[in-house]
Amino acid sequence: MANKPPAFQFYVKDWLSSESVVVMTAEQRGWYIQLLCHAWNGEPIATLPADDRKLKALAGAGDSWATDKQAVLDCFEVEGDRLINRKLTDHYQERVTFCEGRSEAGRKGNEVRWGKDRSVIAMQSHSDDSEIANGSQTIALQPTTFSLQSSEVSESVGEETASPMGKQETSTPPAADSSPVPPTEDAAALCEIISGYSGNAVKPGWYKYAEAILKAITLDKLKPVLEWMYVESDFWGKRTFNTKNLRDHLAEGNLLRKYNAERALHRKKVTKAKTEAVVAAPGAHGNVGSEGRIKW
C-alpha cells in the first residue's frame, strides 16, 4: 500500500476478553498499547526493533520494565531483528484487501462510465480540475456551520437544521494569480488520507476542495468521520473517491447525520460489551475471538 493507514481497528470486546491482557497490570497495559501504536508506524508495519533499550523507551517505561516486561513482550514474536504483533498484521492485511477492493471497484466504475479508453478519463479529470481553478463551481463553506465537540460531530447536527452547510453559495472567482499557491499542510494531509483510503492518486485539483472543507471543519475532527466512512460504512466509502465528493456529501448533510447516529449506537454497544466483560471475567480463553479475529 502506497500510503500507510493512519489508524487500526480496536475491537473493545477482543481487548477486554483477551487472556493476555487480563493478566497484565494497568502499567503493563499502558506499555502494550504504546508499543502497538509504535508498531503500527514501524517499518515493516506491525513491527518493533528487537532491542530491549529501544523497547523500554518506546513503551515509556521506568525501572519496573526490567522485571515486568515479559507479559507484554509475550504478545510479540521475534522475526530476525524485529518483533511482530500478529493482531496488527491481521489488521493491516484486512486494510490492504479493503483498499484494493475499493481501487478495483473504482476502476470498474470508470470503465462502465467512460469505457476502457483511459484518455477519456484523463480528459474529464483535467476538466474537473480546471473548473476548480477558475472558481466556476466554488461553494462557500461557512466556518460556523458545523457544531463540533471533541473528536466527534455534535449530536445536534442534522436534528433541527435541514443542512449543516446552510445554503450553497457561489462565490465570485478570485483574480487570476500567475504564481501558484502551495496547499496548506492540513489540506495536503487530508488529500493523502483520502488517497490512502480510496486508492486514487492525489491530483492538484483536490487541494482546492480540501481548503474549502477545512474552513468549516478541522482536520482532527474530520479524521474520525473519514475512518468511519471508509472502514465501517460501505455506502459512503464507495461514493467518496476524492475531496470533491467529500465536500458534496458534507454540503448535503446526510453524511454527518448518519455518522452521529452510528456513533451513538456504537457507544451503546461498547457500554454493553464492557458490562458483559465484567460479568464474564476473566474472559474467554484462547487467542481467537468468536468472530474468528486474532485476540490482543
Image (cartoon, rainbow, N blue to C red):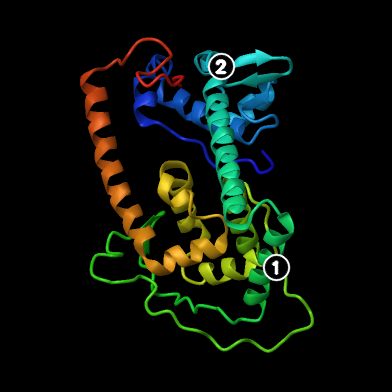
At which x and y percent is residue 257? 32, 59
Q: The N terminus lies in which quarter of the figure?
A: top right
Residue type pointed to by label 1:
His
Q: How many marks?
A: 2
Residue on which disc 2 sits: 73
Q: Nearer the viewer, residue 35 or 199?
A: 199
Mark sitting earlier along the chain (1/2): 2
The residue lying at 63 percent from left, 76 percent from top is 131
Above/below status of 199 relative to 124: above
The residue lying at 53 percent from left, 31 percent from top is 94
Above/below status of 110 relative to 68: below
Q: Is residue 229 left or right of residue 197?
A: left
Mark 1 to mark 2 CA distance (whole Å): 52 Å
The residue lying at 72 percent from left, 70 percent from top is 182
User: Which one is in front in this view, the residue at disc 1 or the one at disc 2?
Assistant: 1
Q: Residue furthest right?
A: 178
Q: Is residue 48 left or right of residue 64?
A: right
At which x and y percent is residue 228? 43, 47
Question: What is the secondary structure assignment of the residue under circle 2?
Answer: helix
At which x and y percent is residue 162? 29, 72
Q: Nearer the viewer, residue 192 or 46?
A: 192
Q: Nearer the viewer, residue 105 or 243?
A: 105
Residue on which disc 1 sits: 126
Q: Quadrant of residue 258?
A: bottom left
- Neighbourhood count class around disc 1 (C-alpha, 10 Å): few under 14, some 14–19, many 20 upward: some
Question: What is the secondary structure assignment of the residue under circle 1?
Answer: helix
The residue lying at 44 percent from left, 63 percent from top is 249
At which x and y percent is residue 183? 68, 67
Q: Nearer the viewer, residue 185 or 29?
A: 185
